[in-house]
Image (cartoon, coloured by chain):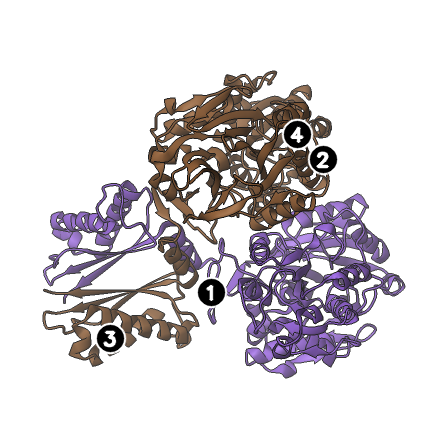
Chain colours: A purple, B brown
Amino acid sequence: MSDRLIYLPLGGSGEIGMNAYVYGFGPVDNERLILVDIGVAFSDMETSPGVDLIFADIRWLEENKHRLEAVFITHGHEDHIGAVGHYWDRLGVPVYARAFTANLARHKMADRGQPEEMIRTVSAWPETTDAGPFKVGFLPISHSIPESAALVIDTPAGRVIHSGDFKLDETPLVGEAFDPELWAEVSKDGVQALICDSTNVFSPHAGRSEASVGPEIEKLVSQASSMVVATTFASNVARVKTLAQAGERAGRSICLMGRAMRRMIEAAMQTGVLSDFPKVVSPEEAASIPRENLMLLVTGSQGERRAASAQLARGKYNGITLKEGDLFLFSSKTIPGNEKGVFRIINQFSEMGVDVVDDSTGKYHVSGHANRPDLLRLHEIVNPKMVVPNHGEHRHLREHAKLANEAGRASIVAVNGTMLDLSGEQPSIAGYVETGRTYLDGNTQIGAMDGIIRDRIRMALNGHVIVTVLLDEDDEPLGDAWCELMGLLEIGRSQAPLVDVLEADVTQFLGRAKEKTLSNDDKIEGDIRRIVRNSARDEIGKKPEVTVIVSRLS
Amino acid sequence: MSDRLIYLPLGGSGEIGMNAYVYGFGPVDNERLILVDIGVAFSDMETSPGVDLIFADIRWLEENKHRLEAVFITHGHEDHIGAVGHYWDRLGVPVYARAFTANLARHKMADRGQPEEMIRTVSAWPETTDAGPFKVGFLPISHSIPESAALVIDTPAGRVIHSGDFKLDETPLVGEAFDPELWAEVSKDGVQALICDSTNVFSPHAGRSEASVGPEIEKLVSQASSMVVATTFASNVARVKTLAQAGERAGRSICLMGRAMRRMIEAAMQTGVLSDFPKVVSPEEAASIPRENLMLLVTGSQGERRAASAQLARGKYNGITLKEGDLFLFSSKTIPGNEKGVFRIINQFSEMGVDVVDDSTGKYHVSGHANRPDLLRLHEIVNPKMVVPNHGEHRHLREHAKLANEAGRASIVAVNGTMLDLSGEQPSIAGYVETGRTYLDGNTQIGAMDGIIRDRIRMALNGHVIVTVLLDEDDEPLGDAWCELMGLLEIGRSQAPLVDVLEADVTQFLGRAKEKTLSNDDKIEGDIRRIVRNSARDEIGKKPEVTVIVSRLS
């Protein structure tokens, strides 16, 4: 049987977040593998309460790690790099990235006690790295973080280009401009497949350059009369620089707040991608600077509860309190799903009299992703045999595949777990692999389908009743049953305390129960659960979760 | 002391939802009162898990119900009418509304076993209703539901106009057009205060008419080749009519799905506000009609899990399954905060191959609220002494007050619980009343601050450990402690089951505990809670909620 080239998204296709893409080349089911990106997604109260981070489920890859050659990371955003420290020990192979990304990755390894030296710094194309049958180069492309790269993956079955997150920006301010000649040169001998970012496929107009927001930001900052605070998406280095320079020109001292912000700027300076950045002052120094001479650049554009913007919205943070007449700029777009958190902050600022400026005018933010016409333009430059959309929810992937099809290119929707064979003239489905989500909860990893989170959601929706029953050596009830309620109303329809009603009903059941029932814990539990649920429904109109504890003297 | 005119929002100011506004006239603290609107808000997992509906807290009004003359309802949307059946018995006064709104209100009263005859139908201005010192007229204004009305509230201190929800639509298709001459006539002798909808104060361009979407919808429907399904915001009667007529012209049978949709159309027909509506078929009949000849009009534009659109997205509903090539139209805008639910549905449809069209082009939906220039236009027509913004979050109220101030009018931000004196030349704060939210949970009402929901959220975030300890007559432990876990990982850092680790730690504590501790339930509980939380933190990195049950043989 001949060799084949496969592609297998484990995360990031069918959702936005936790990117993890496997490529393989070799004999069927014995391909040598590489992994591209290893990111996280963020939890929410509705689907994953209490969860700290979400990773792609990489069990398939772990089971096949003897076939894994290396990990390549396209850029330093959390949804591409965030799991490297958590997952590295399950994979154990070298991780390749460009200098800025590698700097961020090493800190993530150190944070989790993993060996930093396994992060290997590579230079941009035309340098390449050998990994089994693969030769991988980092082809610069513009995005909202420095040193983003597409991967040029050469295999015996041809060249694959994995776009990574990108936009077509010829004046990105920080990092390399999109270079259409270089991309055309790389693609000129034929590209087997383009695996391509789908995030903005529904945005109909060509994207705008990072350079376009500078003059507007400068105007806004120069007109402000009191303190100016600004936040960006993921501490976007180019935007932070634009903001800081606008502040400096307006005679303001710049103060960076929030761990991620400081880390990002530090990494950019250490690796030389950021220069001409104004001198910054510490929060302690900032507290003594007149507010009209101060600008804070802070984390938290998405309303994250622990980030600097949310803390400033709740009151004093690092010795600084915002007040009437201050200006807060969201130089960012709210990601769908985060609206409530962002509006909560805006309303808190509104109560303080702080003037909030957001992206609604389109003046103070541009997206980091390629819009529909930009996607088409990249398809044309690369001119691949096939386009495989990734980095998107199902609706994005489907629309992107349609777009490619309409231009006469082969395409397919492949969600997480779908293994494609890219060897031929068009992509074909080679199989399915079990995948899903892994939750970081406290400091342990749990499967999304283990039922643990489902139990939490049920307790949150329905409340929790705990019933304790004590039986003696002869299976006779000792005293009355005992109920505890958590998250439930104390008084129900009958105006008696709910706990009393439930205890009476369970005690009555125990008094009537036969020896056959009382000798059987499962039977007791099942019967009591049913009694409590029905009784609660009558009293308060809802059926709680019930835990029954049978204690036996023995 | 002289009489005064007061205004007191109990709900709807500082949030969007659960509208409830009190007006009063008379001697200080002994004013006679009326209530305008009595609506609901909707729960979410983040702040109110398991809650069925949210109402304004009306305890202040209930304590003063001997001073309450009547309730007036401006229009039939849930956030204005939804609590009438739940709250009527706590108020006990007549409820006035126009015919269509009254039809909806009577069903809500019947649903809760309340007397339908307390809903009194009134005609539009110039008819007025006396209520103590007030004379109240329903002045027609356009909105996204028939028979919306502003209230003209005449008092000895002058005329107040309460806008209700509105837009300035001169071609609304169903219901009365906005009539600037009538409004000017009503306002010509001077208006003391305009209490005014703030929802769209951030929308910079004048609003578009309901009539503008018809041609686009007609074009879309006529080009569809398979089944067409459409949903609107709150079963918007005019939009449903436009959609149904487009469907009929394209040779399609119309089927209404979802209880709220059928109720809304039924009420509109019964009260004569809707005519020329195509004949509809039942879901049973629909199932046997070829899909290219069928159009479904369904509930669920906001992604509500139980509504028809979500059920269709999950699979078969009323015998109908969508499939490749069908068209689903969101003739609606997603309310901030509902994005995740709506995108969940869109992705499910995408997986089925259904083509989804939403509002992103702006062609298939117009808002029901007045935009910024429309607000200014109404201010100018009414020309009140003062503008009091309502129906909005703090950011909307503040922006609306600024807008009025900039045009030289007195204004003020008054959030829920702020009592204003409207008697003078400008609004002044007369005091504060305790208010907040009341939750309908199952069939009981609970206070938002009672701690019940807080406990549910904590269980969802942290999991729940239940510890049972059994003590004999001499306060000696009988056997080992017993732990149950809910929503927590089973195996922690030490690789032993977490439940074993916790039980061992608690048992060890019991073995060492002094008589002084063991005789005191509170002390035992406190100590065990601390031990369990610390032990869990060491094992799994998080501190769970802990319930301790001390059983004593006695």
Q: Which residue is mark 4?
A: B226
Assign a secondary structure to mark 3.
Answer: helix
Q: Amino acid at mark 2?
A: Lys
Q: Which residue is mark 3?
A: B507
Asked if marks 2 and 4 fall on the same chain, the answer is yes
Q: Position of residue A336 (x, y in %)?
A: 62, 52
Mark 2 neighbour density, 10 Å: few (under 14) some (14–19) many (20 or more): some
Assign a secondary structure to mark 4.
Answer: loop
Q: Quadrant of residue A307?
A: bottom right
| Res A219 seen here | yes
Q: Amino acid at mark 4?
A: Ser
Assign a secondary structure to mark 2.
Answer: loop
> Compared to A289, does A413 lie above or below?
above
Tell us which disc is closer to us: 2 or 3: 2
Q: Taking B12 as reference, is A346 left or right? A: right
Q: How far is mark 2 from mark 3, CA to CA?
A: 68 Å
Residue B363, label in figure: 2
Q: How far is mark 2 from mark 1, CA to CA?
A: 45 Å
